[in-house]
Image (tube, coloured by chain):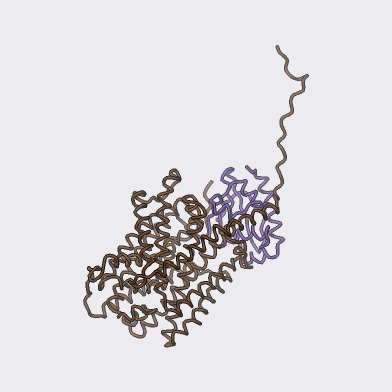
Chain colours: A purple, B brown
């Protein structure tokens, strides 16, 4: 089980990789979204805001309305942000669940793929 | 703690229009006209209604499975849990063929209809098909998606106009219906069975709306929406088949655009143009839904490691461009072959067989998961699941076999050969190529290593100094 601090640290690394990736920033053009993260095992909730082709710092809680809700274990969130976990694999096995539009789901997966694999 | 609220979510109206719109492709008109050959006079509606009743079984199965796995990846999840994953992948890849067939068929039908209303010879359909598919690929590559509202309007317009045209054509014929209640008059029970198999094809793709399970405002809207869509489709398809059998002659029924003749019978030349526009409107849903559903599924399967990573490459608009271009190219080849050979009836038979096959698979998964996952919550349950589910496997399996060996009321093995070639290629890939793809992916992962820093070891509490230990008292 990953605690809050581990997820925040992992996200900070992911955020830097995403914001420093020129190709990814082109892919995020016009994609301003609010994403909620819900950890099933710890009950922790976070909010990720994407605006002006950049990711904002991870915010605690999930109060506002969201475009996309990602539900996973805290370990999966930490592994995902470190790039050690393929979110599609977990999604196709039903371990990560999502709520939101398919194109938003695609965009979120693209972020993780381009940030680490640069495909 | 309250559940998160989604900013954008689909309501029941859009679920119904998506389900009905995906099913009501342009090939619907050709399948309806083809069905008329198997039953007597104006009783084609009985075959459509029977197929609608059978589709209710499929609806119950998809409703239950969707409730258990409310995700776009549901087909992978329930098949993986019901059978060997390699078998599941072979079936899934073969099923994807249906999407290519429907997109190709729509391009061919719309192209042929446009060439006809322009008064051009049939070869003009080829360039029109290429332009249509090129436009669909280009808009997909640019990330253009038809908004829910536009899709609603397009679907309801197509269904309402088709209904009005069919009713008007019947009324204006000024002739009483012939044999409206005797489907077997001059035909065999086998003919009726084949008519029902084609009738099942009229509803094909209504279940694709389950891939929107993550987008709906209320999860039960998916199975409710599918049920309403089936009801609407039974009504509209029954009207079209009866109107076509009553108003059109044999030459018109076997043409590539019977709906244009139906429009002409209802409203004269204006009706012909009206139905040409309506035929083009059906492509909005087919190209939008077909391309997006298939390309995103291929992308996700490639990301999962079950297809080569090349298929997960994205363009700068986060669109998986290789699957989109590939689907466009294959659809173009198929539709041009159909245009050149005039073999659209084979396309209809292959689609009908594959659709019946996937319904049989859904029924099998429903029954199998009742045993394997008895405790998993089922927000919606198929009534009498073992009885109805097993009946679904038998009936849809039988219809799949029937549809695969018949074209236009004649014994013909071409559909079966086409399906066998598709399934063979899927087998070859899954058994020979996939292990190599997976091994390469494992090697890439091992080379990357783990980035996550190891957790510092938890320090064990230091033992208390001997001097401070409490001594025996």
Quadrant in the picture for residue B465: top right
Of B5 and B198, the residue lying toward us: B198
Quarter of the picture containing the C terminus of chain A is bottom right
Tell me: residue B157, above or below residue B456.
below
Q: Residue at x 41, y 80 (%)?
A: B276
Of B309 and B113, the residue lying toward us: B309
Q: Position of residue B293 (x, y in %)?
A: 51, 64
Tell me: residue B366, above or below residue B455.
below
Q: Position of residue B468 (x, y in %)?
A: 76, 20
- Residue B285 seen in this snapshot: no
Quadrant in the picture for residue B52: bottom left
Q: Position of residue B223 (x, y in %)?
A: 40, 57
Q: Position of residue B43 (x, y in %)?
A: 26, 70
Which residue ends up furthest to the top in the rendered image?
B473
Tell me: residue B325, above or below residue B394.
below
Of B205 and B353, the residue lying toward us: B353
Quarter of the picture containing the N terminus of chain A is top right
């Amino acid at each position: 089980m990953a605690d809050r601090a581990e997820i925040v640290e992992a996200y900070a690394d992911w955020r830097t990789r995403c914001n420093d990736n020129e190709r990814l920033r082109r892919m995020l053009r016009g994609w301003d979204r609010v994403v909620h993260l819900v950890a099933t095992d710890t009950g922790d909730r976070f909010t990720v805001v994407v605006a002006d082709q950049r990711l904002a710092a991870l915010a605690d809680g999930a109060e506002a309305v969201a475009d996309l809700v990602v539900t996973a274990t805290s370990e999966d969130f930490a592994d995902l942000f470190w790039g050690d976990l393929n979110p599609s694999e977990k999604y196709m096995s039903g371990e990560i669940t999502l709520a939101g539009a398919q194109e938003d789901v695609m965009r979120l997966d693209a972020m993780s793929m381009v940030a680490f694999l640069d495909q | 703690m309250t559940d998160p609220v989604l900013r954008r979510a689909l309501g029941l109206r859009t679920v119904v229009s998506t389900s009905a719109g995906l099913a009501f492709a342009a090939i619907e008109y050709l399948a309806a006209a083809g069905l008329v050959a198997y039953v007597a006079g104006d009783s084609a509606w009985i075959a459509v209604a029977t197929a609608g009743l059978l589709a209710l079984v499929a609806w119950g199965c998809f409703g239950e499975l969707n409730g258990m796995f409310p995700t776009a990846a549901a087909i992978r999840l329930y098949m993986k849990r019901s059978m060997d994953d390699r078998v599941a992948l072979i079936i899934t890849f073969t099923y994807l063929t249906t999407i290519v067939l429907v997109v190709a068929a729509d391009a061919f039908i719309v192209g042929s209809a446009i060439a006809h209303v322009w008064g051009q010879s049939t070869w003009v359909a080829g360039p029109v098909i290429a332009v249509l598919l090129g436009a669909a690929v280009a808009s997909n590559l640019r990330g253009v998606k038809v908004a829910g509202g536009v899709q609603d309007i397009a679907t309801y317009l197509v269904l309402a106009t088709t209904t009005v045209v069919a009713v008007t054509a019947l009324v204006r014929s000024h002739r009483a219906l012939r044999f409206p209640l005797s489907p077997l008059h001059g035909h065999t029970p086998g003919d009726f069975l084949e008519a029902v198999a084609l009738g099942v094809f009229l509803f094909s793709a209504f279940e694709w709306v389950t891939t929107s399970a993550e987008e709906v405002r209320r999860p039960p809207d998916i199975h409710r929406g599918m049920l309403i869509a089936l009801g609407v489709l039974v009504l509209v398809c029954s009207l079209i088949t009866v109107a076509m059998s009553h108003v059109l002659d044999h030459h018109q029924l076997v043409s590539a655009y019977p709906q244009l003749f139906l429009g002409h019978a209802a409203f004269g030349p204006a009706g012909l143009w009206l139905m040409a526009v309506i035929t083009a409107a059906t492509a909005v849903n087919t190209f939008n839904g077909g391309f997006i559903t298939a390309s995103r599924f291929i992308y996700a399967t490639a990301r999962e490691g079950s297809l080569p990573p090349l298929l997960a490459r994205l363009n700068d608009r986060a669109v998986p461009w290789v699957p989109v271009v590939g689907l466009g190219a294959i659809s173009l080849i198929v539709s041009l072959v159909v245009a050149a050979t005039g073999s659209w009836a084979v396309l209809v038979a292959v689609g009908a067989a594959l659709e019946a096959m996937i319904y049989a698979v859904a029924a099998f998964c429903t029954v199998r998961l009742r045993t394997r996952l008895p405790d998993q919550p089922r927000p919606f349950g198929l009534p009498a699941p073992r009885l109805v589910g097993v009946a679904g496997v038998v009936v849809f399996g039988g219809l799949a076999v029937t549809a695969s060996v018949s074209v236009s009321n004649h014994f013909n093995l071409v559909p079966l050969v086409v399906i066998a070639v598709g399934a063979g290629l899927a087998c070859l890939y899954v058994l020979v190529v996939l292990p190599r793809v997976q091994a390469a992916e494992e090697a890439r992962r091992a080379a990357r290593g783990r980035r996550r820093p190891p957790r510092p070891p938890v320090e064990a509490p230091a033992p208390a100094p001997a001097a401070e230990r409490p001594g025996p008292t």
